[in-house]
Amino acid sequence: MFIGEYQHTIDEKGRLAVPAKFRQRLSKGAVVTRGLDNCLFLYPKEEWVKLAAKLAALPISQANTRAFSRLMLAGAMDVEIDKQGRMLLPEYLRQYAEMQKKVIVAGLYTRLEIWDEDKWNKYKESTEVKSGDIAEALGDLGV
C-alpha cells in the first residue's frame, strides 16, 4: 500500500524520482493521469486496469460520466521507472497540475498523488481547518 508524504523535485527534463519505498510496487508498470484538485494520479498497472474497467462500464449517455471518463482515460499515459528510480512526467500533465520544480508525492493506499508543492500546502492547510466537519460527514458513511 502507498502511505506517506514525500518532497521531491522535477528535473529539467521533466523526470521525477519516485520515492524508493514505492519503486518495487511500480516496477511492473504504472499509469499517470489527470487527478482531481489539480494533481496527478499515479497507479500501479494492476490498479489502473481495475479502475479503467469501471470507467469503461459507466453509461455513456450521462454527461458527467463521459466527462469523468475523458478526464481520467484520455489524460492517461504509461510510464516506466528507469534504473535511477525516475519516471518522465509528460509535459501536458505537468501543465495540467501547474507543477513547478518542487512537488509532493502523497501515498493514498492504492495510488500516489503528485502535487505542486505550493498547491499541496494550500490544500492541506484548508483541509486541516475543516477536519472536524470532514470527520463528522465521514461518520455518516461508516468511517
Image (spheres, helix red, strand yellow):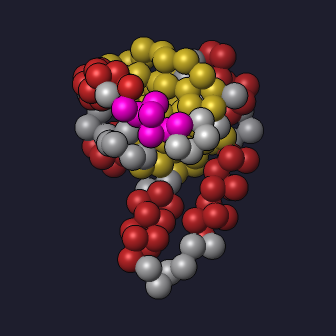
Tell me the magenta residue range: 133-139
Quadrant of the rendering where the C terminus is positioned: top right
Q: Quadrant of residue 49?
A: bottom right
Instruction: Give the percent coordinates (x, y) of residue 18.
Output: 55, 23
Residue at horizontal 45%, vertical 34%?
Answer: 136
The answer, for residue 87, to whether it is visible in the render is yes
Image spot of residue 68 (x, y percent): 43, 63
Residue 87 in picture, x, y percent from top left: 53, 32
Q: Residue at x 50, y 81 (%)?
A: 60
In this view, 107 is above or below 88? above
Most common SS among magenta residues: helix
Q: Residue 111: x percent and y percent?
A: 59, 37
Residue drawn where x is 63% and y is 56% of the image: 51
Compared across the picture, whether 23 is left or right of 98 comes to right
Residue 84 visible in the displayed image: no
Q: How many marks?
A: 0
Please state if 104 lies on the left or on the right of 1 as rendered: left
Residue 54 in which image quadrant: bottom right
Whether the magenta-drawn stretch holds residue 106 is answered as no
Q: Nearer the viewer, residue 5 or 88?
A: 5
Quadrant of image for the N terminus: top right
Where 125 falls versus 97 (above or below)?
above
Q: Nearer the viewer, residue 38 or 131?
A: 131
Foreground pick, 139 / 42:
139
Relative to 87, 126 lies left or right? left
Q: Going by the image, does 52 lie left or right of 127?
A: right
